Image (spheres, rainbow, N blue to C red):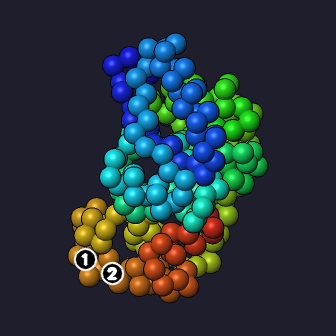
């Protein structure tokens, strides 16, 4: 991270003591590495996080996976829906492969273990600031093996649900938080056509809303990282 960069950060964790410790660590990085990390807000719930993300548009959100009023995975999905332009770095006590994989599938730019915050956070911030993905070295290999296995499962699930190529494209842009008008522009079709595809997708996934479609697609492995 260059000294000219001034990332703005939103801390999202329901443990105030953890947020305070994180602030201390970030201040340490500023002093010892000539960084200019600025914490512009703190949130303890999903609702607060989404509100502040929309208001402040921080360049980086540090997000816990367990929050009051919603979990971190759905928070990641909702951030896409509001077209949050920055990066999200997960700071979690969960070290299980399943949690890591789902977080990365949902759009996280990196994953840091809370128990190893002091040794992982510096590298994570540096890596994410370069628009690269950060994963702890000890889980990276397992993650990519899981990715390949889930990709094979994704192909089987897509075939079973009879999703067409166009429906898969619409679903992809839906998970990016695109509106019907934006999807239409990306795919060079009319808004009415997009709505027709969404109706078909909702029926096949047995859901009734855009958010439910995204969550279900995530659970079924239809959303690829």
Kindly check if marks 2 and 1 are in contact, taking CB atoms under 8 A apart as contact: yes
**10 Å neighbourhood of mark 2: few (<14), some, or many (≥20)?**
some
Q: Residue at x 53, y 48 (%)?
A: 12
x, y (%) of residue 212?
52, 75
Rendered view: 121 above or below 90: above
Q: CA distance from mark 2 to mark 1?
A: 6 Å
Rendered view: 28 above or below 186: above
Q: Residue at x 39, y 35 (%)?
A: 8
In which quadrant of the rendered view does residue 199 lie? bottom left
Residue carrying label 1: 191
Rendered view: 194 above or below 76: below
Secondary structure under tag 2 reads: helix
Viewer-nearest residue: 125 or 48: 48
Horizontal relation, residue 188 to residue 147: left or right: left
Q: Residue at x 43, y 43 (%)?
A: 41
Secondary structure under tag 1 reads: helix
Quadrant in the picture for the N terminus: top left
Q: Residue at x 34, y 63 (%)?
A: 178
Residue carrying label 2: 195
Residue 140 appears anywhere in the view = no
């Amino acid at each position: 991270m260059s000294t000219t960069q001034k990332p703005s950060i939103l801390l999202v964790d329901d443990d105030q003591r953890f947020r305070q410790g994180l602030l201390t660590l970030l201040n340490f990085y500023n002093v010892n590495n000539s960084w200019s990390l600025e914490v512009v807000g703190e949130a303890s719930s999903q609702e607060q996080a989404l509100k502040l993300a929309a208001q402040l548009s921080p360049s980086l959100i540090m997000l816990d996976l367990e929050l009051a009023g919603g979990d971190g995975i759905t928070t990641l999905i909702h951030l896409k829906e509001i077209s949050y332009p920055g990066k999200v770095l997960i700071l979690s006590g969960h070290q299980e492969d399943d949690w890591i994989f789902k977080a990365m599938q949902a759009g996280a730019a990196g994953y840091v273990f809370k128990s190893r915050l002091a040794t992982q956070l510096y590298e994570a911030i540096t890596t994410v600031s370069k628009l690269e993905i950060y994963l702890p070295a000890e889980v990276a290999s397992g993650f990519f093996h899981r990715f390949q296995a889930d990709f094979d499962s994704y192909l089987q699930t897509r075939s079973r649900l009879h999703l067409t190529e166009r429906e898969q494209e619409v679903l992809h842009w839906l998970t990016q938080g695109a509106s019907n008008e934006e999807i239409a522009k990306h795919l060079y079709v009319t808004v009415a056509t997009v709505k027709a595809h969404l109706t078909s997708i909702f029926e096949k996934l047995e859901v009734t809303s855009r958010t439910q479609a995204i969550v279900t697609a995530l659970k079924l492995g239809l959303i690829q990282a």
